[in-house]
Image (cartoon, rainbow, N blue to C red):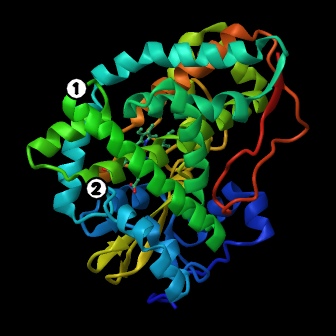
Amino acid sequence: MGDHGAAVREYELFTPEVMADPNGFLHRVRAESPLAWLPQLDAYLLTRYADVNAALRSKRMDSANMARVLQRLAPAEQRELAPVRRSIEMWMGHTVPADHVRFQQLLKRYFTPATVDRLRPRVREFTHELLDAVAAKGQMDVVRDLAYPLPANVIAELLGMPVSDREQLQAWSRDIVPIFSNGDVQQLRTAQRSMLEMHDYLRLIAADRRRAPREDVLSTFVAAEAEGLITEDEAVANCVLLLFAGHETTANLIANGLVLLFGNPDQLALLREDPGRMPSAVEEMLRCDGPAGIIGRVAREPVELAGHTVPAGRHVYLALMAANRDPDVFGDPDRFDVMREGNRHLSFGMGTYYCLGAALARMETDECLRILLDRCPDLRPAYQSPDWLPSAPLGHRLGSLPVTF
Ligand code: HEM
């Protein structure tokens, strides 16, 4: 049970109503009970912009452990999956604040505006390559042929992987995802095997970069290792974090963004008329259907949230997607408006854990959609309704996105 008074209402999350219309559900929760209790998750939920923003910035809240899903397993399975848990516990954001700051400072050496500028021409090349591969057919599945491989190629590039190993990275990524989406034990075993394989592979690259540094993340890490700032285990674990943090998220933004454009032909026309509107269109895609719809926190000490005191140790979910449609902050919040001004969405988080890859993800999505629209003047959806996967109720991920051009 939650530890709250009558003013905090309870809601079931795993219902057909929520699955069918998550935004409608969240509008209702926001209006009825700014702090809500989710008995199925044994956790609170925040939906108002002001409250989500305050919780993101609060020093009294820790990031929730991604390995939490492993804790529901039987003891023998937990022992079997201990290596994957230990590795995730080394990810920045899961560590104590001092280690978090240490990793953040290291990664900021790599994630600079200059790196984003350096990767831009590569992103253009990757996008053209992927479109060349399907051009003659006049049709493609945007998820499989473009949105999924593009950010994987970018991460392969930033990890310093040779072109020949790119497909391998996508396979690892596919295997590892179930850890964070309630996979069954068999999937978790596969995930662990792939994660450990990826660790071994990254150790080989790290050894090479110690001899001959380049402009990639592992070169940054091994330089820091020489300064005594990071261990090799921490370095390889955090490379897997980058894959997890930057692959599916960016892929979903590209694919979901295109669905928004198809669903709003007037807005697509505005972009075709002036592709210079793409940056604000990408912000609006992030606001309306950002890939990280909901994120977790744990109260480190008693904390005041939406007028209630939440005790230490309690899990609190922050519905970024609900904050992004709060009518107190965004006029006509359910309207997709590529020219929206003052779009202060929270899709990359805020405060201590703010997304380190935000500029990279924005650039990838911008370049990819710009090139797609430019090369395909007759781009059309080839589906009756979007192929949303039956994933977590507040997740919004496409299985496929067939188009013709
Ligand atoms: C559209 C794509 C993306 C979205 C929506 C997104 C979203 C987010 C969000 C919401 C957080 C904060 C999590 C929290 O507060 O608990 C975060 C953190 C993070 N993101 Fe992203 N992200 C995206 C792309 C990327 C990319 C491309 C990379 C790098 C390759 C990246 C690397 C990170 C890292 C390292 C963190 C942890 C920051 C920290 O703990 O200090 N993300 N991201």
Quadrant assignment for the C terminus: top right
In the image, residue 103 above or below residue 304: above
Identity, as a three-letter code, of the amino acid under mark 1: Ala
Count residues near mark 2 (Cα–Cα under 10 Å), then give few for <14, some for 14-19, many for 20+: few
Q: State if disc 1 and disc 2 touch (CB < 8 Å).
A: no
Q: How many angstroms separate mark 2 from mark 1 (CA)? A: 20 Å
Q: Earlier in the sequence, mark 2 or mark 1?
A: 1
Q: Position of residue 222 (x, y in %)?
A: 20, 40
Residue 289's disc is none
The circle drawn on residue 233 is 2
What residue is shown with label 1?
212
Q: Residue at image x 59%, y 34%?
A: 167
Vertical placement of 20 versus 13: above or below? Answer: above
- x, y (%) of residue 351? 29, 50
Q: Quadrant of residue 380?
A: top right
Q: Secondary structure at mark 1?
A: loop
Query: Which quarter holds ligand 1?
Result: top left
Please name whichever residue, 397 or 209, is drawn nearer the observer in this view of the structure.
Answer: 209
What x and y, as percent, mark residue 290? 56, 44
The amino acid type found where label 2 is placed reads: Asp
Q: What residue is rendered at 42% in x and 74% in y?
A: 82
Does residue 350 appear to the left or right of 255 in the view shown? left
